[in-house]
Amino acid sequence: MGILDQLKSLFGNTPNLPLQPTTTQPDTPAKAAERRHGERVDACMGTRAIIIDDSKTICTVLRKFLRSAGYETIECLDAEHGLHALQQHGADVVFLDIMLPGMNGFAALRAIRRDVATRNIPVIMMSGNEQAIEQFFGTRIGADDFMKKPFSRQEVFFRMTRLLDATGVPRRTLLAANAASGTTASSNAAPRLMRAS
């Protein structure tokens, strides 16, 4: 018995509803399925990610995804604690929610980019709020990528793979780094930041 037959037996026969037409987007389910079957490239073992999100669920999900691939994670529920953790422990990548209590994600990103010690750390912004998403794409204030919530495991690793260099170290994208600093592509060869133990 198929899943559809099982559902029908549970809920009774329901009339067939007409299917809604689908439109092809740049990142279609077919592409997502293709990525699922392709070989995933992970960051080098021990890559540290700081997750800054006021949702404990999002922090838990990202921690589970990233730790399963050998990442170290630090989770913070607000920007102030996240910036402190970044200063104290260092990181190779930051997952930063836009809508946060107190300091929002845009202000936190500006603080990360102003600080010499953190300005070259890749930042992936996240939000499920449509207004915040529109504001993000309108400002582009130095983030390296963006994930819309809710997101899948494949989406997280797709975003990470785009940031990895040949040695498996997350690096700032040329476009984001140059836009934030006003420099040319040749100045993006920053060495990997040393982390405090």
Image (tube, grey):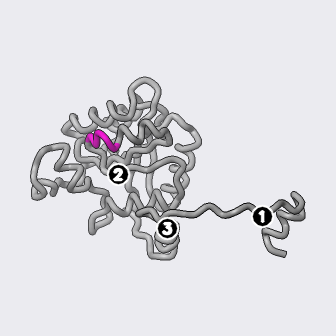
Kindly check if marks 2 and 1 are in contact, taking CB atoms under 8 A apart as contact.
Answer: no
Label 2 sits on residue: 145
Can residue 44 be seen here? The reply is no
Q: Position of residue 66 (x, y in %)?
A: 48, 55
| Residue at the image position 30 percent from the left and 60 percent from the top | 169
> Would you call the spot at circle 2 few (<14 residues within 10 Å), some (14-19), or many (20 or more)?
some
Q: Inspect the image, locate mark 2, and give the three-letter code of the amino acid beneath it.
A: Asp
Q: Which mark is on residue 16?
A: 1
Residue 52's tag is none
Give x and y (percent) for residue 114. Answer: 21, 34
Q: Secondary structure at mark 2?
A: strand
Q: Is residue 60 above or below residue 101?
A: below
CB under 8 Å between discs 2 and 3? no
Q: Residue furthest top?
A: 102
**Residue 32: which disc?**
3
- How far apart marks 2 and 3 lie (CA) works out to 17 Å
Which range of residues does the magenta coloring cover? 137-141
Name, please, the residue furthest toward the front: 18
- Of badges 2 and 1, the one in the foreground is 1
Q: Quadrant of the N terminus?
A: bottom right
Q: Which numbered disc, 2 or 3, marks the residue that appears first in the sequence?
A: 3
Asked if the magenta segment contains residue 140, the reply would be yes
Judge whether 96 appears above or below 167 on screen. Answer: above
Q: Amino acid at mark 3?
A: Ala
Magenta stretch, main secondary structure class: helix
Along the viewing direction, whichever of 58 and 128 lies nearer the viewer: 128
